[in-house]
Amino acid sequence: MTVDTGPEAQLEPPRQSSLGTAAARNLATTTKSAPQMQEITSRWLLRMLPWVEAKGGAYRVNRRLSYTVGDGRIEFVQDGADVRVIPRELGELALLRGFDDVDVLTAVAGRCAQRDFRAGEVLVQRGDRAGQIHLIAHGRIRQTSVGKYGDEVTVAVLADGDRFGENALLDGEGSWDYTAVAETSGTLLTLSRADFSAVLSTAPHLQDHVRKFSSLPRQRQNKHGEAEIAMSSGHTGEPELPGAFVDYELKPREYELSIAQTVLRIHTRVADLYNEPMNQTEEQLRLTIEALRERQEHELINNREFGLLHNAAFKQRIQTHSGPPTPDDLDDLLCRRRGTKLFLAHPRTIAAIGRELNARGLYPDHVDVGGQQVPAWRGVPILPCNKIPITKENTSSILAMRTGEDNQGVIGLRQTGLAEEYEPGLSVRFMGIDERSIISYLVTTYYSAAILVPDALGMLENVQIARKPE
């Protein structure tokens, strides 16, 4: 007998002799995971903030009376290459705080002369007569002076919205006690004492305002601008002791709870038939709550009313010395407050901190926070938060904060005991079933944050996080 060994016979597949895996899986129980979600982050801010009950939906921060005025930043408008200061923004100057005559402010703004500067240009020289105020529209300016031992020291680094020389508008005998040098190119607006005096001479309301400003009780303040508590110490005998009382702000700030809500919808067929091995309603609710908590942390950072980035006191905001986040910058940020609990930075910013430490042969400490090892500087943990924005110029910010109500720090606000509360400060309310068999649940959370005293929160701004070319 002859066996066919042609090409067709050689290509014939072997016959299946057992059940295949594809068919077998139809009878097998599949092991599956719970629904996964990429949006979930560590949410360190929510974990580290002490949460305080805000009964009545609001929290009032009572402080000692303070005479500190005009410490905000100034905003500008740009029309091509021309830059103008917004007249009402001049109210951020201590001299003009509370003055609301728009016509007079417009006249003052019109006297501001634009000056474009280049990197390395000396803007004011130490010892020269100070006869104008400079408003920085854009750019970085370093102020330097002579130290005790004759070496040059940095006084401050200023950037967009800052100003210097404010006292020159009224003090005709003053002189610059520092040298201001431009680190980058930019633009500033200059208002001379002569131009301000010209407007002042024709504005009686402004004259009254300046007189009131000049009569403020500047000698009865402590270094923080708070009303001083009179006392005597180091005396002998029986001198008459000064009387004292602690004055309070008449209009303290109130923080109202904000809200994040969504309506979760589930078809009754899904809820009835597809609940094994995982409950569909519970899984849908779990992922919805995760998204709400992410939004909550985003608002605590970025909300213009109560977010930390927008509510950090301007005197607690500092600039980097050279751009990248160096150990010196972290020390400057750390030394501005007692009992700093944590640094908060974008993960890319933390990587930039690591590069700067490595370049100097330093290795960051690590501390235990909630059972997890995290990098630290001077024993203060540096925690990641991807809600802190990064600009298109690859700059970001680093926050340093003291926390807790007893420490006069930063606190989170919420209200518990809500109707149908699912988690502290978060409720899930059944809204019924509509004519399309859709079950609806209203998921709501209430929250806010409060800074009890200005130095509880500090910020290192314009941190360069891009890697420099090798």
Image: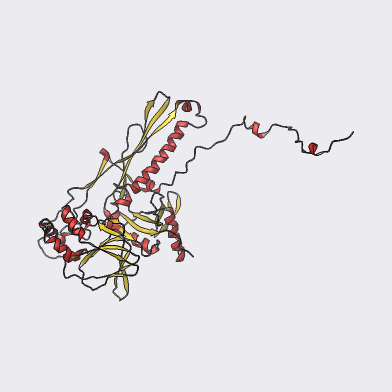
Front residue of 132 and 421: 132
416 lies above or below 332 = above
Q: Is residue 462 above or below residue 372?
A: below
Identified at 32% across, 48% down, the residue is 307
Q: In this view, which residue lies farthest toward the top? A: 435
The figure's colour scheme reads secondary structure
Viewer-closest of 222 and 256: 256
- Point out the residue furthest to the bottom here: 150
Q: Please identify the residue farthest to the right as the structure is shown.
A: 1
Q: Give the quarter of the figure containing the N terminus.
A: top right
Corner quadrant of residue 199: bottom left
Q: Can residue 409 be spotted in the picture?
A: no
Q: Is residue 331 left or right of residue 4?
A: left
Residue 245, how many percent across, how many down?
A: 15, 53
Nearer-the-camera pick, 332 or 7 = 7
Q: Residue 77 at what x, y percent from top left? A: 28, 55
Q: Where residue 354 sits: x, y (%)?
A: 45, 60
Q: Is residue 35 visible from the viewing direction of this image?
A: yes
Q: Could you tell me residue 422's position as x and y percent?
A: 38, 34
Residue 293 lies in quadrant:
top left
